[in-house]
Image (cartoon, rainbow, N blue to C red):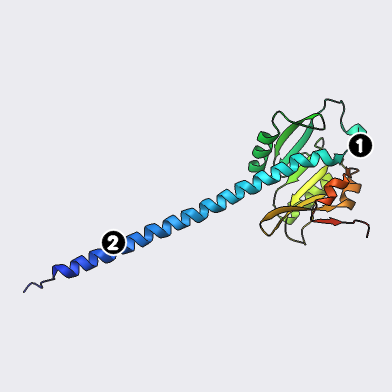
Amino acid sequence: MAIFTPPVLKLREGAAVSRLCSWAVRLLLCVFAIQAAASQSEVVEYQIKAAFLYKFGAYIEWPEQTFPQTSSPVIIGVMGSDAVADELAQMSSGRNINGRPVNVKKLNYGDPIKGLHILFIARTDQSRMAATLTAARGLPLLVVTETDHTSMPVGVINFVIDGEKVRFDVALRSAEVNNIKLSARLLTVARKVIGAPS
């Protein structure tokens, strides 16, 4: 004998499935929204760091022999972050640093860094960071890093996220080793100046 299933029950099952699908769609939309917000946040962070890298050049004094000619460009190397390099290249196009044109170079870890004037090293592991900083030691080069870990070696300038803002710390001893001078105006806007006279 066939079992009769009331139509009402089928309707209720259909409604439950419909609600479940609706919730699934909402959940997916929320996930996409979170991912989009995170992606947008990363883009803004890249833009801010690129702007800082461009601006830093105006507050650095390199040794006289660093630039062969008065028209020689300021060369900024970006290691490990094509996104920052692209932002920086777009931002600095047609502009100059203290009257010098700006060239932006994309670099991989281990690429030669001699001849650069500013080097940005994106987040990486400790061994890669240490190797790059060792290669940069003593060169007339502003090295900029980004790490929040106190155990990691850092450059002359190190980007940190303070709250929701991009800030930077300055290590004066590293600047001295690389024979570059930092403007007092740059130091006043740093979050922390390491090695400053007390």
Q: Is residue 25 visible?
A: yes
Instruction: Indicate the amino acid at tag 2.
Output: Ser
The residue sitting at 70% across, 46% down in the picture is 49
Q: How many marks?
A: 2
Where is residue 6 drawn, in percent x and y?
A: 13, 70
Of 51 and 66, nearer the camera is 51
In the image, residue 163 sits, relative to residue 4, either above or below, namely above
| Residue 106 badge | none
Q: Is residue 90 left or right of residue 25?
A: right
Q: Is residue 79 visible?
A: no
Instruction: Indicate the amino acid at tag 1.
Output: Pro
Q: Secondary structure at mark 1?
A: loop
The residue sitting at 77% across, 34% down in the picture is 75
Where is residue 20 drawn, in percent x and y?
A: 33, 64
Where is residue 109 drawn, in percent x and y?
A: 71, 45
In the image, residue 3 sits, relative to residue 23, either above or below, namely below
The residue sitting at 71% across, 34% down in the picture is 92
Asked if marks 1 and 2 touch (Cβ < 8 Å), the reply is no
Few, some or many residues within 10 Å of mark 2 (<14, 14–19, 20+): few
Name the residue that disc number 2 marks: 18
